[in-house]
Amino acid sequence: MSIAIQRGATEETSERAAAAPQTPVIELQDLSVRFGSREILKSLNCSLRGRAIGLLGPNGAGKSTLINTLLGFYKPSSGSARVLGHDIRMQLRVIRSLVGYMPENDAFISKMSAVSFVQMMAELSGVPASAALERAHEALFCVGLAEARYRELGTYSLGMKQLAKLAQAIAHGPKLLILDEPTNGLDPSARQRMVRMIREIRDSKELQIVLCSHLLRDVEDTCDEVLILNRGRIAHYSNLEEERKANKRFLELETYGANGDFTEAIERLGCECAKTGNRLKMILADGVEVRDIYRIAAERDVRIRRLNFRRDTLEDIFLKAMES
Amino acid sequence: MAVYRRTYTSYSGALTSAWSRCLVLFRYSRRNLFRSKLQTGLFVLCFFYPLLCLIAIYAAHNLSFLERFGANDRMLNIDNKFFFIFMNVQGTLAFVLTAFTGPGLISPDIANGALPLYFCRPFSRAEYVLGKASVLAILLSQITWVPGLVLFVVQSSLAGPEWAWQHLWIAGSIVLSSLIWIAILSLLAMALSAWVKWRIVAGALLLAVLFFGAGFGQAINGVMRTHAGHFIDIVYLMATVWNSLFRIDSERSMSSAAAWIALLVYCGICLALLVRKVRAYEVIK
């Protein structure tokens, strides 16, 4: 069967090209979603531009509802949202042509081989049949299912089904990859493989990622920007990448033999210090390096037993957000 | 084929037109359909009666052939009744074929949660239903109005243009009666397939809707001394429409217009059921 490649399709192609990296990935303006009398998302406002954005929150926070609304599965009750600069009410078809989506739950066709399944999904996204077959093979190789690609999906293990879902999400070459709980139900090694895969896709710099999870480690390992939702509201926004850079100056020392003289010497360098017992927390001043601390310690016969770059972990940030 | 590429690469090639994506679903569904030997065998079986009819038409115009079997030309009359019987036989076969194929169209997608994967793409719910319906519509067309029209053309070529002109309405009746039957069967099978996750149960329900509907309708008529029971008997409604289309004289307690309206209402109900169920995620309020 020949597939017509028409001029109409060039509009979608040009839309793909137009999605420049500077455009916010997700822009929410007073977005609310209501199911019956229950308000699930409450006036969300934000603009996210990161290469990998994490959506965090406890179960029932509204993460999946937000994703489903962005994909047009649910209608917003008020407000608006834009994905890669396209309005979710007016340009849903364009958005869907730019997005690859990996749903949370089982989603496959059991009596189909993985390669047919991924090929069909790529064709439904508009890739011509011959190119779709090629892309299906590539995607399955990319996610590590090359050996099993001719097997029926019904015979796959849970981990393999997750990978097949990832393959169908990337087969048509989306500009934005939305992953809803991608490590759900995976054992530790499979989880590690999945996280590594997501990082590799992110590092290819050909697309942006929105990762929705309640597992902090998954988000911390893959994302550079985090939006924490709680009870349908934005509880916290954090740019992990910037925090990581900033916290390179935050040190925690465990010392033996340190006295007031040691602390004073460090403070004279312009660092801020706080001492509790044999632990010393400090913020390094500009131009001061860790080797300067070691030098001062050696001059005063102070032994440094442990030195950590201490920063708020994502867990700290998350717990603070939940408390607030 | 660049299968050696292990890293993600974006796609920047040409895209197919939006309308052609319905055909993707049709192509894959049809391929799955004919993987079953039983269904393929059943499909082939559906062409035996049209073949018999073809021989009958040939025989009716070949006196020497008939005389060899001790028959005369009055025994084989090719008229509206001949095509009416043809449609009844093929209609029954179409129903059996639908009972086998229809329930497997949507239920596996719903059972395996595949609908979000379809609808997160530039592919609407209407296109999905259209793509799935086209599988049944084309399959059933191949055994109803297409062979019916072939028989009409053969008969016309043998009987001459005068016969063809006088009986042209039969061609219209063949197409129209097939289309309404195909529409009812396809929509009913898909609605049941969408609402019942198990394929076998959906098939059984399809049989039940037609046979129990007929029985229940008769029971209502008998107990309440009315004819309103016919409205839940799809087979009776269909027979009323076909009788009027093929101009067959029979006493019917319902007008063909009422039967048409009832059938269209059934189509509407099935569509509403499909719209309700075929969606990425159900909202539980």
Image: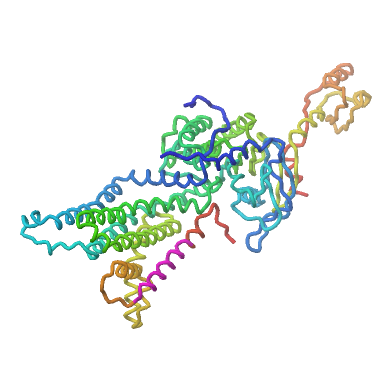
User: Image check: B43 left or right of B117?
Assistant: left
Q: Is residue B28 above or below residue B96?
A: above
Q: Is residue B127 visible?
A: yes
Q: Quadrant of residue B172?
A: bottom left
The percent position of residue B106, horizontal first and vertical second, equals 44, 52
The percent position of residue A162, horizontal first and vertical second, equals 52, 39
Residue placed at 49% from the left, 26% from the top?
Answer: B2
| Colour setup of the view | rainbow
Residue placed at 58% from the left, 42% from the top?
Answer: A97
Assess whether residue B128 is covered by the magenta stretch. no
- Majority secondary structure of magenta residues: helix
Depth check: give the residue in front, A297 or A180: A180
User: Image check: B281 left or right of B211?
Assistant: right
Across the whole image, how many numbered discs are drawn on residues?
0
**Which residue in the rendered view is the most extreme toward the front?**
B162
Residue placed at 49% from the left, 51% from the top?
Answer: B127
Q: Is residue A261 visible?
A: no
Depth check: give the residue in front, B116 or A214: B116
The percent position of residue B151, horizontal first and vertical second, equals 24, 55
Q: Is residue B28 above or below residue B99?
A: above
Depth check: give the residue in front, A87 or A11: A11
Q: Is residue A17 above or below residue B95?
A: above
Q: Which image quadrant: the N terminus of chain A? A: top left
The percent position of residue B97, horizontal first and vertical second, equals 31, 54
Residue placed at 51% from the left, 49% from the top?
Answer: B115
Depth check: give the residue in front, A94 or B83: B83
Q: Quadrant of residue A114?
A: top left
Assess whether residue B268 is covered by the magenta stretch. yes
What's the magenta region?
B254-271
